[in-house]
Structures are given as C-alpha cells and as structure tokens.
Image (cartoon, helix red, strand yellow):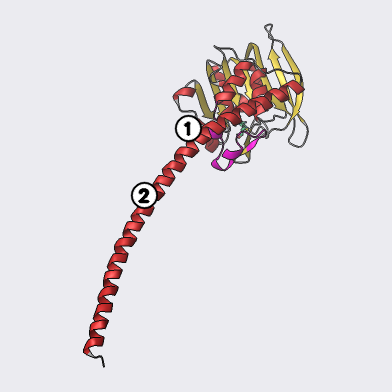
Amino acid sequence: MFGVRSEQRLLQKAAAFVLNAVGQERFMSALAQCRALLAAFVASAAAFVSTSASTQDRAAERAAMIETIKGHARSGAHSIDPAVLKTMGTLPRERFVPEAQRGAAYHDRPLPIGHGQTISQPFIVALMTDLINVRPGDTVLEIGTGSGYQAAVLSPLAAKVYSIEIIPELGKRAAARLAVPRFDNVEVKVDDGYYGWPEHAPFDGIVVTAAASHIPPPLVEQLAEGGRMVIPVGGPFATQFLMLVEKRRDGGITTRQLLPVSFVPLRGGPSR
Ligand code: SAH
C-alpha cells in the first residue's frame, strides 16, 4: 500500500527518470553525432596525413633505393645509365606490389606478387634495363610481365614495349596497372613468351625475367641486328647466370656470362 505522499514521490521519481532518459537519449544522440563527426574528421585528417606522408616518405625511400643500386653497381665495377636511374627514381614501385607488400616496396630484394612469382630486386631491374642499352625509338620485348614494374621502367626509355606473361591473372592485373596514359606505349599479352612476339619483331632489346634452361632460339631470331638480349640461364636448383646475348651487325651471335642470379623458372617452351 502506498500513501498519497509516497505515490507522489514515486511519480516524481518516475518523471525524473523519464526526463532523465529522454535527456540522456538526446545527449547520447548528440554525443553519437559528435563522435561520428570527430571520427570523420580524424579519418580524413589521417588520410591526408598518410597521403602526404606516404608521397614524401616514398620519395625519400626511392632516393635511398637509387643510392643502393648505385652502390651495388659500383661494387660490381659497373655503372648504370643515369636515364635508367631517373626513371626508377620517379616510378612508384609500391603500386606494383600487393597491398601486404607495400611497406617493403623499396627494400633491396625481390617481393612476392602472387602465384609463386616475384617482382625482381630493384638493382636487378636497373642492371637488366641498363644492359640492353635502350635508346629512344627502340622497340623492346619483355618476357615475364609479372607485376608490370619492369615494363613500366622501360616505358619512358623506349618507343614501344611489348611484354608477355604466361599466368593469365598476373598478365591481366599488370595490363590494368599499365592502362594509364603514362604507359601508353606498353602492350601486354598473355601467352608463352618462349616463342616471342613475331608480329612485332625485330626487337632492339629483349629482357627475359624468368630463368631459362637454354636461350630460346625464337628470341635470338627476333633480336634485331645490333640488338641485345639479357636473360638468366640455368636450372631452378643450379646456379643461374645472367647472360648478355648480342646480335652483331653481321648477324653473328655473341654471348657473355655476367653474374650469378636467382630467378623464378621460365615455364612453357618446347618441354611443356
Ligand atoms: N618482370 C617482372 C618479374 C617477373 S617474375 C616484374 O617486373 O614484376 C617472372 C615472370 O615470368 C612471372 O610472372 C612468370 O609467370 C613469368 N613467366 C614464366 N614463364 C613464362 C613464359 N614462358 N612466358 C611468359 N611469362 C613467363
């Protein structure tokens, strides 16, 4: 049994509770709005900071990568064409690696790009590009598009770059990455690169970025007179060597073994 006074008190309490609840609800929704606004602000500020920081940091990382490349070249008594270094110094390598690898994009080593394949170590990309001696007006063929990075490095140096990738998913992904005006002289196709791309031969330069058991005769055939091919040769469990193949003006072939390297194997070819 409640008396009148206790009933009144109860009503007052209930009213206070309801008011409190309504007030709390308003307060909560205002708080939620504030929180949402704050979160949006923090997110956009973070995005802004990370974009500007990443562009700046990455430029610094690229510069450091170029110094490392120069250092490797010096210790091998080789010098890399400044045009190659300039291209690599402005190309965002992080765009050519999977998201999980972005942080390591400028590390001095190859990185996984999926399907058991790798993007080559920056020094090797620089060296191979330098070795084929690309001149403006040249037509270049790459075997093993992979991430598309090597093709992107070749793009501003050559008139035309053809690149062949045997794994359809990688080929398509690289082609999509390269489908921007900056790389409009690059053409990618999914095929077995062992046989080259006869429709566009002869090539002034050929870069093979997977290790072959032997130098594919179709590629030698498609090399222009005075042209150069760089190719890793050797089995997957044997030491591979980077070879420089030159087709002389008289049509004769010169090969030079340069340095031990480690590449993923070239698939396909007649032994398939
Ligand atoms: N140049 C690449 C690195 C590629 S790794 C880059 O800059 O990222 C070697 C690539 O060669 C792999 O993607 C592999 O799938 C491809 N490959 C292997 N055998 C091939 C063949 N017969 N024809 C074309 N591509 C081949």
Taking 102 as reference, is 77 left or right? Answer: right
Start-end of magenta stretch: 91-111
**Helix, strand or loop for disc 1:** helix
Amino acid beneath label 2:
Leu
Q: Which residue is mark 2?
A: 37
Does 234 sit left or right of 122 as displayed? right
Q: Is mark 1 within 8 Å of ligand 1?
A: no
Amino acid type, mark 1? Ala
Disc 1 crowd, CA 10 A, few/some/many (<14, 14-19, 20+): few
Choose the circle earlier in sequence order: 1 or 2: 2
From the top left corner, tell me how far across and down residue 208 is, in percent: 64, 25
Q: Is residue 100 above or below residue 226?
A: below
According to the picture, the residue beneath numbered tag 1 turns out to be 176
Q: Quadrant of ligand 1?
A: top right
Q: Is residue 238 left or right of residue 190?
A: right
**In this orientation, which residue lies closer to the viewer: 253 or 121?**
121
Farthest residue in the front direction?
5
210 is within the stretch colored magenta: no
Q: Residues within 10 Å of mark 2 (few under 14, many from 20)?
A: few
